[in-house]
Image: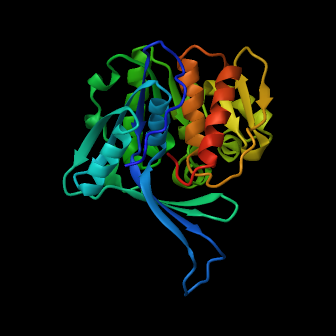
Amino acid sequence: MCARRTIAAVSSVPKRLLCVGDLNADITVTAHADVVPGSDTPGTVTLSGGGSAANVAAWAGESGCATRFAGVVGDDPLGDYLVAELAGHAVDVVAVRRAGVTSRAIAALVGGDGNRSMVSDLDTATVMLPDDVATSWFDDVSWLHLTAYSYFPATGRATFRVLADMATERSIPWSIDPSSSHMLASECELDEVRHAFTGAAVMVPNHDEAALLSGQDDPVAASERLLDLAETVAVTCGAAGVVVARRGSATFSMDPVPVDLVNALGCGDAFAAGFVTSRLGGSDDRSSAERAVALAARVAAMPSAR
């Protein structure tokens, strides 16, 4: 289990964040030299808790925000590890167990520049179904966070809509991370994606995801176009910082916190956690973005996502 990392609390107000979605193991492969096909390459291979929604929950919990997570794991030792590891980050974990199913693992290939490529196992056996959702998950909840990793498998799209509708019916704001431009383009109909994401209070796409969903390559233009879907859009642009647009407010940009990049895995999730928990605690968008980029920089200097 990962050692706990204590960071400053975002607010003394007891508001609860609910994260629903992917919980998996990250198998991170970092090569210390160019990979030699058909032979051996020195490097490190690590196993840690992962999953975009789970990463957001972990960093929210570490920030002092009351946090609940709901997701699906196999009824196996790996599932036991994943639940216990996430709970160790001060998260109330609600795990839907699937008997006879192996918990998911994601392979992250990290290059010398710290950037990562992912091989994602989207086994439909660990996708949440509408009947899995319990109204009790929303007890005392003030914000819902979702990721598109729950939307990509066709069997998960009805569940995504159920969760968003349940939040809306309870006047609970919700946020969405589009998660992967490649998966959006290859697995989904973009008009359907835009419809599903409409109504979000906050959207946190990276530059590629924002460009795909908006049809605009410029991050300022993309963020403002996506205001048709979400009230606030924060487009993360790596070393170029972040652009934040909000209906009725002036769009602004913010530089990133300088850092020696070790691993980009989970940086976007940390940004989402910092932004959402700050908004939940009553901060304005600029203060929320400042906290978010600082937390993303902290994760960028780590060898794992949490």
Residue 24 location in percent, x, y?
Answer: 39, 51
State the residue at coordinates (27%, 37%). 132
90 sits left or right of 257 in the view: left
Picture quadrant where residue 207 is located = top right
Q: Which of 273 and 19 is in front in this view?
A: 273
Q: In this view, does 231 lie above or below 41?
A: above
Extreme residue in the bottom direction = 38
Q: Nearer the viewer, residue 168 or 77?
A: 77
State the residue at coordinates (73%, 14%). 248
Residue 232 location in percent, x, y?
Answer: 64, 24
Residue 304 location in percent, x, y?
Answer: 52, 52
Does residue 199 show up?
no
47 sits left or right of 92 in the view: right
Q: Which of 295 and 124 is in front in this view?
A: 295
Q: In this view, does 43 lie above or below 9?
A: below
Q: Nearer the viewer, residue 137 or 229?
A: 137
Q: Is residue 41 above or below residue 236?
A: below
Q: Which colour scheme is used?
A: rainbow
106 sits left or right of 299 in the view: left
164 sits left or right of 189 in the view: left
Q: In this view, does 97 lie above or below 115?
A: above
**Picture mark count:** 0
State the residue at coordinates (35%, 53%). 124
State the residue at coordinates (70%, 61%). 113
Residue 82 location in percent, x, y?
Answer: 34, 48
Does residue 249 show up?
yes
Extreme residue in the left direction = 99
